[in-house]
Image (cartoon, helix red, strand yellow):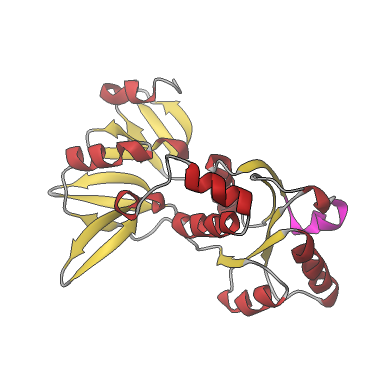
Amino acid sequence: MFTAFFNALTLVNDEQFNTLLSIQLASNRHFDSHTSATLDQLTKLDTSQFNVILLQLSEAPQQNLLFQLIDLSKNAKLVIIADDPNLATLAFEVGAIDFITTRSPISRLNKCFDKLIHLCPLASAMEQAHPMTKSLTHSHLIVKDIGKVRLIEIDDIIWINGAGNYVELHFWQQGASVLHRVTMKNIEQQLAPAGFIRVHRSTLVKQTVISELAVTDSGDYKLKLKNGVQLNLSRRYKNSLSAIL
């Protein structure tokens, strides 16, 4: 049946990446439903009810699984996920429409979704007609560094903290942050349409990545993000989360 919406099956063993994938699927208007399972459960599932399958490989598949992947790619749009980028060639040989690694940023996942939409005429037509389709100008931050200019995709940023005359941009994968010379006030105004809210004098966070709130002894709150990071929510900015509290 031709449809503008996707029913997705994810077979992903990497817990953190599966969480990220689930968040992005839930927030994408083209995905009508999402079922999460593991590769071990593949033979027990009726895959005919899904038109998109995202499947993680930890190693090159044995012959039986290889044949299964080829069959899946004939009946659904198959996306292969792996830790090892060297499995990309195999992914396309079995008929996958895309290959991503478990270290892929949010923007790379969204490019994968864009490819799925482009390959579906009804979904593509609906996307073109949607008023919220973003332009390059509104989807990137221009970050100037010594001798170069970087384009940082807003989709990849999940929280921001002030650091003097700069802000630090933080991403889903915990690790290196990016310094950006801008005031907290200006970055807050710029990113408000993308769902960022002020939770502390020096902290902005994307509301959709908040997973837990806990009250501290001082009456303030601790925020836990879906990637495990914990941040302070001061009483002054409590109203920012009034819908949750």
Horizontal side of residue 147 vs 45, given as left or right:
left
Q: Give the vertical position of 116 relative to 244 (above or below).
A: below
Percent x, y of residue 219? 34, 20
Q: Is residue 152 visible?
A: yes
Percent x, y of residue 235? 29, 22
Horizontal side of residue 214 vs 59, given as left or right:
left
Q: Is residue 227 visible?
A: no
Horizontal side of residue 104 vs 140, given as left or right:
right
Which residue is found at the position 39% from the left and 20% from the top? 242
Residue 61 counted in the magenta span:
no
Which residue is found at the position 71% from the left and 71% from the top? 95
Which residue is found at the position 24% from the left and 57% from the top? 142
Q: Which residues are magenta?
A: 37-45
Q: Assign the magenta stretch its main secondary structure.
A: helix
Quarter of the image for residue 233 reads top left
Percent x, y of residue 196? 34, 37
Identify which residue, 184 or 214, lies in the foreground: 184
Quarter of the image for residue 152 reads bottom left
Q: Give the vertical position of 82 relative to 38 (above or below).
A: below
Percent x, y of residue 121? 62, 54
The number of callouts visible is 0
Horizontal side of residue 128 vs 184, given as left or right:
right
Identify which residue, 218 or 166, lies in the foreground: 166
Quarter of the image for residue 240 reads top left
For the C terminus, the quadrant is top left
Q: Give the vertical position of 108 relative to 95 (above or below).
A: above
- Considering every residue shown, the one lying at the far left of the view is 165
Q: Give the vertical position of 79 relative to 183 (above or below).
A: below
Residue 42 counted in the magenta span:
yes
